[in-house]
Amino acid sequence: MKYDEEIIDSYVITITSGKGGVGKSIIASNLANVLSNDYRVLIWDANMDFPNQHIMFGVEPPVRVNDVYESNVHVSRAVFNIKKNLDLLADTPARGDMQEFDSSVILDVYRQLLIESKYDFIIIDTPAIISETLLQCCNISDLIAVVVNDEPTSLLDAYGLLKILLPYISEEYINMIVNNVIDIEDSDEISDKLNMATEKFLDIKLNNLGFIPYNRNVRQSIVQQTLLTNSKPESEVSEAIKNISKKILNKLELEEKINNI
C-alpha cells in the first residue's frame, strides 16, 4: 500500500466517511491532539471544498496546502505549527475560479512530507464525498477509519464507500468508528447493522475502533474553536478519543511484532 517503502516512517491514518455531517473532522482533530501528547503528529486537511481543520483549531495559516497543489510553494512552507508536536496542513475553501484538480498531487505532497519530515503520525481528514482525492488518501494509509452514526443514510453511504474502496484497498486496513451515540449498546447495534450488510454482500467484517458518545459540548467546542480534548479532557468524549488512540497504538504495536517475526 505504501508509496515508497524505503522512505516511509510515518503511520498514516485516514479519517473518512460516506457522507458529510457525521463528525469525521471533529474526530480527526481531537485524535491528532491526543496523539501529539506523546508523538509528532501532522493533521492534513484534504477536504478541498469545505476544509474544517483550521476552524477546529482556531487558526488561520498564512499559506495553505492548495498553494502546494498548484505548485506555487513547497510543502514545508504550508506546514503550520499549532503546538509542540502538532502541525497542520490547512486548505482554503473552494473558489469559483479553481482549476480542475489532479488528485495525483496528493501522492506528490505525501512523498515530500515523508522525505523532509519526521512525523510519527499523519492524520488525513478527507472530503465528505466519494472522489478520486478520497481514494488517493485511503491508498496511502496504514489505517482507514470510516465514521458512521445512527442515521440510515450514514450506514448506506458507508456501505457504498466500502464497495468502491475494496477493489483497491485490502480489508485489513479498513476500520469503523461509531459517532454520536448514547452508549456502547447503541454503538454495537449500529456496527452490527453495517457488518451484517458487509458480511453478506462484501464478505468482510469491519473492526470497530470505538464509539464517541453524544455530548452537547461538542457543538459548543466547534463554535468556540477549542478542542474538547483541551477544554474538557476528562469528559466522556475526550475519554472515548483517548481509548481510540490506545487501540490504534496497540494495533500498530501488534503489526510491528508480526513484521519482526
Image (cartoon, grey):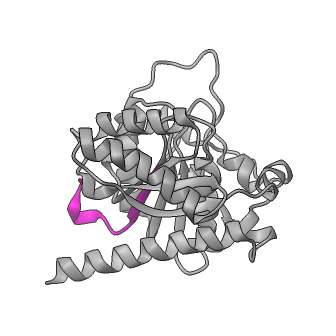
> Would you say residue 43 is visible in this rendering?
no
Left or right of 173 in this view: 47: right
Q: Is residue 176 visible?
A: yes
Locate residue 255: give its quadrant.
bottom left
Image spot of residue 51 (x, y percent): 63, 39
Looking at the image, is 68 positioned above or below residue 141?
Answer: above
Give the image location of residue 78, x and y in percent. 58, 49
Locate residue 224 relative to residue 189 in the image: left or right: right
Q: Residue at position x 65%, y 74% from top?
A: 239
| The C terminus lies in quadrant | bottom left
User: Residue 115, located in which quarter of the rendered image?
Assistant: bottom left
Residue plotted at (58% across, 38% down)? 151
Report the residue at 29% width, 79% height from top: 254
Residue 94 horizontal side relative to residue 2, left or right: right
Q: Is residue 4 magenta?
A: yes
Q: Give how far across and how far down residue 141 sits, in percent.
A: 35, 54
Q: Residue at x 38, y 65 (%)?
A: 11
Q: Who is closer to the viewer here, 44 or 238?
A: 238
Q: Nearer the viewer, residue 4 or 121?
A: 121
198 falls in the magenta region: no
Quarter holding residue 260: bottom left
- Answer left or right for 250 relative to 219: left
Range of residues picked out in magenta:
1-15
